[in-house]
Structure formats: structure tokens, C-alpha cells
Amino acid sequence: MFTTTRRVEFGDTDMAGIMHFSNYFRFMEAAETQFLNARGMSVTWAEGGERFGFPRVSVTCDFTRPVRFEDVLTIGVTVEKVGTKSVAYRFDFTHAGQAVATGRITAVFCKAVHPHGLEAIPIPDTLRAKLEATE
């Protein structure tokens, strides 16, 4: 499992001083980007005159405990499944060893098509191997 940490900033919290639910999605996206970067990949890139990426098609998060300003969260990223054209991630959020949330993202491998559209395409074996690699 890939892990990263992130501190809850004041702007991440609501009037009650608890991290607003929407910021878990931002934290998941940042953790996904770090995970991909650690494997020499990115969420979007250009190659051979074409543009590729992994836009999201599903995002969920379940919350078990509140977190507050200046709490440091550990975010574990696990690839749950690599399909023909999609990848499903799980994000396990903990604070001080306690589970606080579990999120999921499903992203589809796409190439840009003109004008301004996307086409889902099979994940190449080279990318699949990087996504499926264990630590």
C-alpha cells in the first residue's frame, strides 16, 4: 500500500472546526497523484502528439470520525482493480492510528479526441504493470 500524509489546514474546516466532507475528495485526488508520480505516471499527459489521462467516473467517501484543524492524516492508497479500461482505488484515512474515512475513486483511461471530447481506450500493458506493481 502506498501511503502519504496531509495536514488539515484551517481552510479545510467548517464552522464547527471539523474538516468539511468535500475536502476528503481533494485529499484523495492529491494522494492519487502522488501514488501515480511514485510510479513514473500522472493523471494526465501528452505523448506522441496525443493527450491521455484518467478522468474520474465515480467517487465516494464514507466517514467514521471527525478530524480537525492541524490533524495530520495518513492516507493509504490501494489499487483494488485494474480493468480493461479502468482503475479502481481505495483510500484509507487514519489519524493517530484511528480510521476516520474510506474513499474510492474509479478512473477510466482516455485519450483526447477533437473537438474537446474523450474516448475510453484499453490501458496499455506498460501502464497496467505500473498500476499493479506492489510496494
Image (cartoon, helix red, strand yellow):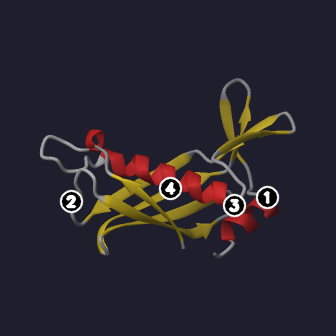
Q: CA distance from mark 3 to mark 1?
A: 15 Å
The tag earlier along the polypeptide, 4 or 2, is 4
Residue type of the residue flagged with mark 2? Pro
The residue at which mark 1 appears reads as: 124
Residue type of the residue flagged with mark 4? Ala
Q: Nearer the viewer, mark 1 or mark 2?
A: 2
Q: x, y percentage for residue 108?
A: 62, 51
Q: Residue at x 59, y 59 (%)?
A: 35
The tag earlier along the polypeptide, 1 or 4, is 4
The tag earlier along the polypeptide, 2 or 3, is 3
Q: Residues within 10 Å of mark 2 (few under 14, many from 20)?
A: few
In-image side of 134 versus 79 (left or right): right
Circle 1 — which element?
loop
The residue at which mark 2 appears reads as: 66
Q: x, y percentage for residue 62?
A: 30, 62
The tag earlier along the polypeptide, 1 or 2, is 2
Residue type of the residue flagged with mark 3? Arg
The residue at which mark 4 appears reads as: 31
Residue type of the residue flagged with mark 1? Pro
Q: x, y percentage for residue 129?
A: 75, 68
Q: Residue at x 36, y 52 (%)?
A: 24
Q: CA distance from mark 4 to mark 2?
A: 19 Å
The tag earlier along the polypeptide, 3 or 1, is 3
In this view, the residue farthest toward the top is 115
- Comparing 2 with 10, the one in front is 10
In this view, the residue farthest toward the right is 48
Circle 3 — which element?
loop
